[in-house]
Image: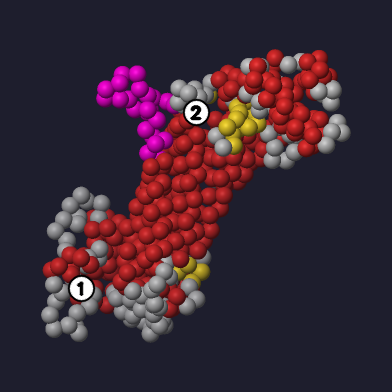
């Protein structure tokens, strides 16, 4: 069934129909299309286009369409142009010619916007729930090893010692910002477009605020031309999804490295790893590699819609049909990766002695020593030079920080005072970093508690 055609002498070619039809991917909007159509029927009734019996007949028929849609063969043989024409055909099978009234004063332009917003609103809620779950797993993993020390890195070189919970809280903060972005994306999505018509507004006296209330929208759109041309809300979601995938990919890369034999810090559970078809000893971090790989698909979806929209004149253009597949793809990949990441985090077992030894045998304490000299009156540039020479001397002679003591430090440079020798141990240096946001033990404990409270407030 087509929603247009009177102006045409002949129908579209088979090639054009195959090229332009979208039912094969936009059929996932069926529930949203049914719900939006029911609200529109009720608005038509309020506007006097339908009577109450017609309204009841059609809304009941829509209910039956939604119920039947879960059957596995529901779409078999369908050749409809899109989900909207499919739903109206199904409606006509149930209510006959009465179905011809359902599209009174309604354009597919606003209908597509409505359906996509209804669907995306639910996807935002799903994504927010998965983010909360992952953030909770990170806090639980931090609580398992509250005193564990690991080297922090810059340039993938050991830099300064930090607490394991401090490291995990860095990702918690990334995902907390992602949560804010999806909350904002949902807010911008949750605006009701019905009543906009094709681009100039409806010619029927719809109570748009009543429709918005009916469908749970926060507000109504302000400009009918903007509605027809707008996919900003989809771009907002795709941007938030892309940033989240970048964060997931970075965390995956960390844990792929840290679980390797070369690092050996942590063990991934059997449930999130796989083996080799040839090499019996292998335990591969496939779950994390897939998260890292799938990030490209989500970033590609964002770029796809960016390029689709960049040169379109107002208002609607058929190019905009190309928003659906990237949006669906991104949502599927993002939510799958968030779910997987939560399972991986739940499976992680840290071997605290391994990163501690890595910290002890390296010179992650160098900054602690330089800052101690500066606090004692040595200009920092000079302090930096002194500790740099100490590290060079140690590297040349194969000495670790623990191979030095108060006497040997003072012999090397008189600026070193006896109490500074304690800073040769990473745990002591961290105690000087009790500044908000730092890795000092008391600060990190407070940050963990505060993060837990923030997470609880999101539930």
Res. 368 image quadrant: top right
Mark 1, Cα crowd under 10 Å, few <14 / some 14-19 / many 20+, is few
Q: Is residue 360 left or right of residue 100?
A: right
Residue shown at 17% from the left, 82% from the top: 8
Position of residue 229 relative to residue 167, above or below, is below
Q: CA distance from mark 2 to mark 1?
A: 57 Å
Q: Which residues are magenta?
A: 268-291
For the N terminus, the image quarter is: bottom left
Residue 46 or residue 331, whichever sits in front: 331
Residue 235 or residue 161, whichever sits in front: 161
**Could you tell me residue 348's position as x and y percent?**
48, 27
- For label 2, the residue is 258
Q: Dominant secondary structure of the magenta stretch?
A: loop
Describe the element under mark 2 as helix, strand or loop: helix
Q: Which mark is residue 2?
A: 1
**Could you tell me residue 43's position as x and y percent?**
39, 74
Inspect this view and state whether residue 217 appears. no
Q: Which mark is residue 80?
A: none
Describe the element under mark 1 as helix, strand or loop: loop
Residue shown at 39% from the left, 36% from the top: 289
Residue 321 or residue 300, whichever sits in front: 300
Q: Earlier in the sequence, mark 2 or mark 1?
A: 1
Inspect this view and state whether residue 373 appears. yes
Mark 2, Cα crowd under 10 Å, few <14 / some 14-19 / many 20+, is some
For the C terminus, the image quarter is: top right
Labels 2 & 1 near each other (Cβ < 8 A):
no
- Magenta-drawn stretch contains 427: no
Residue shown at 50% from the left, 59% from the top: 185
**Could you tell me residue 360's position as x and y percent?**
64, 20
């Amino acid at each position: 069934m087509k929603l247009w055609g009177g102006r045409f002498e002949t129908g579209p070619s088979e090639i054009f129909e195959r090229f332009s039809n979208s039912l094969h991917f936009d059929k996932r909007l069926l529930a949203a299309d049914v719900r939006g159509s029911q609200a529109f029927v009720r608005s038509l009734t309020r506007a006097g286009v339908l009577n109450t019996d017609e309204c009841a007949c059609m809304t009941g028929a829509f209910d039956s369409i939604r119920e039947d849609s879960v059957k596995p063969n529901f779409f078999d043989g369908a050749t409809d142009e899109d989900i909207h024409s499919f739903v109206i055909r199904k409606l006509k099978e149930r209510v006959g010619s009465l179905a011809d009234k359902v599209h009174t004063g309604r354009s597919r332009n606003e209908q597509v916007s409505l359906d996509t917003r209804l669907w995306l609103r639910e996807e935002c809620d799903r994504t927010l729930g998965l983010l909360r779950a992952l953030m909770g797993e990170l806090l639980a993993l931090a609580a398992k090893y509250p005193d564990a020390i690991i080297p922090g890195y810059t340039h993938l070189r050991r830099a300064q010692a930090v607490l394991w919970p401090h490291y995990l809280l860095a990702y918690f903060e990334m995902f907390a910002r992602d949560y804010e972005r999806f909350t904002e994306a949902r807010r911008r999505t949750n605006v009701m477009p019905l009543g906009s018509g094709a681009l100039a507004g409806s010619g029927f006296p719809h109570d748009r605020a009543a429709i918005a209330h009916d469908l749970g929208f926060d507000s109504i759109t302000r400009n009918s031309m903007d509605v027809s041309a707008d996919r900003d809300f989809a771009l907002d979601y795709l941007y938030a999804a892309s940033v989240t995938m970048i964060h997931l990919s970075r965390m995956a890369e960390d844990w792929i490295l840290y679980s390797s034999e070369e690092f050996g810090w942590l063990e991934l559970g059997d449930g999130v790893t796989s083996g080799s078809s040839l090499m019996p000893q292998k335990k591969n971090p496939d779950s994390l590699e897939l998260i890292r790989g799938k990030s490209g698909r989500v970033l590609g979806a964002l770029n796809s819609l960016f390029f689709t929209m960049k040169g379109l004149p107002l208002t609607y253009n058929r190019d905009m049909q190309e928003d659906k597949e990237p949006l669906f793809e991104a949502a599927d990949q993002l939510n799958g990766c968030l779910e997987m990441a939560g399972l991986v985090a739940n499976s992680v077992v840290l071997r605290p002695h391994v990163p501690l030894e890595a910290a002890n045998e390296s010179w992650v304490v160098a900054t602690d020593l330089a800052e101690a000299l500066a606090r004692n009156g040595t200009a920092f540039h000079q302090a930096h030079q002194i500790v740099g020479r100490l590290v060079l001397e140690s590297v040349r002679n194969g000495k670790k920080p623990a191979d030095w003591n108060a006497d040997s430090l003072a012999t090397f440079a008189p600026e070193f005072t006896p109490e500074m020798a304690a800073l040769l141990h990473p745990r002591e240096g961290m105690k000087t970093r009790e500044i908000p946001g730092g890795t000092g033990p008391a600060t990190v404990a407070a940050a963990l508690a505060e993060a837990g409270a923030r997470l609880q407030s999101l539930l």
